[in-house]
Image (tube, rainbow, N blue to C red):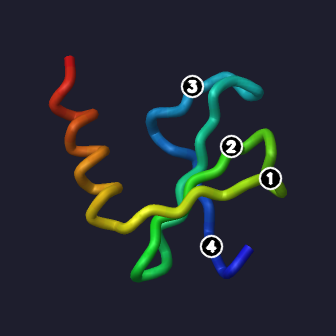
Amino acid sequence: MLGYKFVKSSYSGGNSGQECVEVARNLPHAVALRDSKRAEGPVVTVAPAAWDAFTAELRRRP
């Protein structure tokens, strides 16, 4: 998939088969997201700045 190297997000549940998001940050101009249960399925890409803002907001929430 375009050279993306996906890893499971630290926000994903620990049990296999549940709410697993994989994130690829290895390309300079895109962050890619996919559902680990559908590795061949759709991939959503966002700008690195958008991903950084999203994860910063998650860290601010209780």
Q: Are marks 1 and 2 in contact (CB under 8 Å)?
A: yes
> Which element is circle 3 on?
loop
Q: Which residue is labeled 4 in the image?
A: 4
> Which element is circle 2 on?
strand
Q: Which residue is labeled 3 in the image?
A: 13
- Quick one: label 3 or label 4, which is nearer the N terminus? 4
Where in the figure is residue 15, as x and y percent of width and height? 67, 22
Image vertical order of residue 32 relative to residue 62, above or below: below
Q: Residue type at mark 2?
A: Asp
Residue depicted at 68% across the width and 43% down the height: 35
Q: CA distance from mark 3 to mark 4?
A: 22 Å
Where in the figure is residue 42, as x and y percent of width and height? 73, 54
> Which element is circle 1 on?
loop
Image vertical order of residue 16 relative to residue 44, above or below: above
Q: Are marks 3 and 2 in contact (CB under 8 Å)?
A: no
Q: Is residue 35 left or right of residue 9?
A: right
- Quick one: label 3 or label 2, which is nearer the N terminus? 3
Q: Which residue is labeled 1 in the image?
A: 41
Image vertical order of residue 38 relative to residue 60, above or below: below
